[in-house]
Image (cartoon, rainbow, N blue to C red):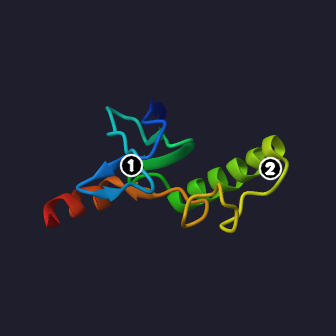
Amino acid sequence: SLILSTVPGPPTKVKFSGKELRNVYGFPPTVGKMSVCVATFEYNGQVAMGILMDDSVPEYELFAKYVTEEFSLLYEEIVGKPLTAEDPEAPPDGPAIPVITVKQAAAAATEG
């Protein structure tokens, strides 16, 4: 099962506590028996994606790898050039999709 959510964010750069935000990633909560939750967030002309997966999903890292590869191919098809870290329009750390499992999220929440 999959949930996909897209959220429009600010179309221009914003500051938080005096610091400019470079990227914003959303992580939707898992609901019911949903195994994979994907959120896209639009910010400053870019789209970022966050993935939250149930720990029962085998090889969850491959899902993010394949999604990243397909988005890169789609970008190249639309824009006419590959998406690379050297591209001035690319995110500062290059194209990446953060993935976290439910157990990892719970552990991080109890540490803070």
Residue 76: numbered disc: 2
Give the labeled residue for mark 1: 54
Residue 23 sits in quarter: bottom left
Label 2 or label 1, whichever lies nearer to me, is: 2
Query: Mark 2 belongs to which amino acid?
Result: Glu
**Residues tagged 2 and 1 counted as in contact (Cβ below 8 A):** no
**Residue found 54% across the figure and 64% down from its top:** 92
Looking at the picture, how far across and down is residue 104, in whole percent?
31, 61
Q: Position of residue 18 (x, y in %)?
A: 26, 57
Q: Residues within 10 Å of mark 1 (few under 14, many from 20)?
A: some
**Rendered residue at 58%/53% (across/down):** 63
Secondary structure state at the residue bearing disc 1: loop
Q: Could you give the CA–CA distance between mark 2 and mark 1, rounded to whole angstroms?
A: 31 Å
Left/right of residue 39 with respect to residue 82 in the rendered view:
left
Above or below 100: residue 85: below
- Three-letter code, disc 1: Asp
What SS does tag 2 mark? helix
Residue 32 position within the rendered picture, expressed as x and y whole percent measured from the top left: 32, 32
Q: Left or right of 99: which side holds 88?
A: right
The C terminus lies in quadrant = bottom left
Q: In this view, does 79 lie above or below 96?
A: above
The residue lying at 44 percent from left, 46 percent from top is 13
